[in-house]
Amino acid sequence: MPGDLIVGWPSSLPSAPSMCALTVILLCFPGTSLDLLWHLNPDAQKGFRSIGKLAVLLMCLIGVACTTSAVGLWHGFNWGRKLALVILSLNIIGDLHNATIRHDYRALIGLPIAGAMIFHLASRSKES
């Protein structure tokens, strides 16, 4: 059945693209009252600002990739599962980098979450 790959799928569908869109808005319109949101992760603001306009392009690409994967998963397409596996694997690499190189141990919370999602998606491919 479409949409049964991830528990709670309808509520999780817009989360990653929405966060990407919010980041793009924050980057494109600095100095607004929305800048208060950067207090949640001031290092992210510094990092995004350091790469300039490329940050907007990067976040747009991530948002499109997540949306495309979500649509593929929803419809039960194999390419959607594969794209999700790539995205989650890259997320794990990023979390490991943040924890080991930047010593931001908060990133470690993403490892078991992404790992569980990868396990779930990979086990679904064996059932097909």
Image (cartoon, rainbow, N blue to C red):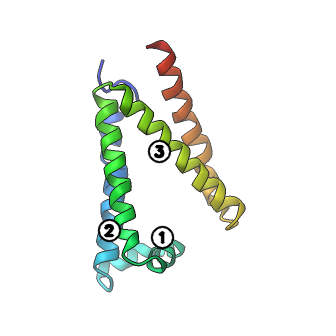
Nearer the observer, 115 or 126: 126
* Quadrant holding the C terminus: top left
Q: Which mark is residue 24?
A: 2
**Distance from Cα at disc 1 to Cα at disc 3:** 23 Å
Do the numbered discs 1 and 3 sit on residues whose CB atoms are within 8 Å?
A: no
Percent position of residue 2, x then y: 29, 23
What is the CA distance from the residue labelled 1 to the residue labelled 2?
Answer: 16 Å
Residue 44 in percent (x, y) is at 50, 71
- Residue 73, horizontal then vertical, whole percent: 34, 31
- Reply above or below: 119 against 56: above
Q: Residues within 10 Å of mark 3 (few under 14, many from 20)?
A: some
Residue at image coords 51%, 76%: 42
Q: Given the current orientation, which residue lies at the most extreme top position?
A: 127
Q: Is residue 124 left or right of residue 68?
A: right
Instruction: In the rendered view, tell whether residue 17 sits above or below residue 46.
Output: above
Q: Quadrant of the N terminus?
A: top left
Residue assigned mark 1: 40
Please rate how many residues cluster around mark 1, counting C-alpha atoms within 10 Å: few if below 14, some from 14 to 19, many from 20: few
Q: Which residue is mark 3?
A: 87
Please indicate whether residue 52 sits to the left or right of residue 89 in the image.
left
Q: Is residue 67 visible?
A: yes
Mark 1 vs mark 3: in front: 3
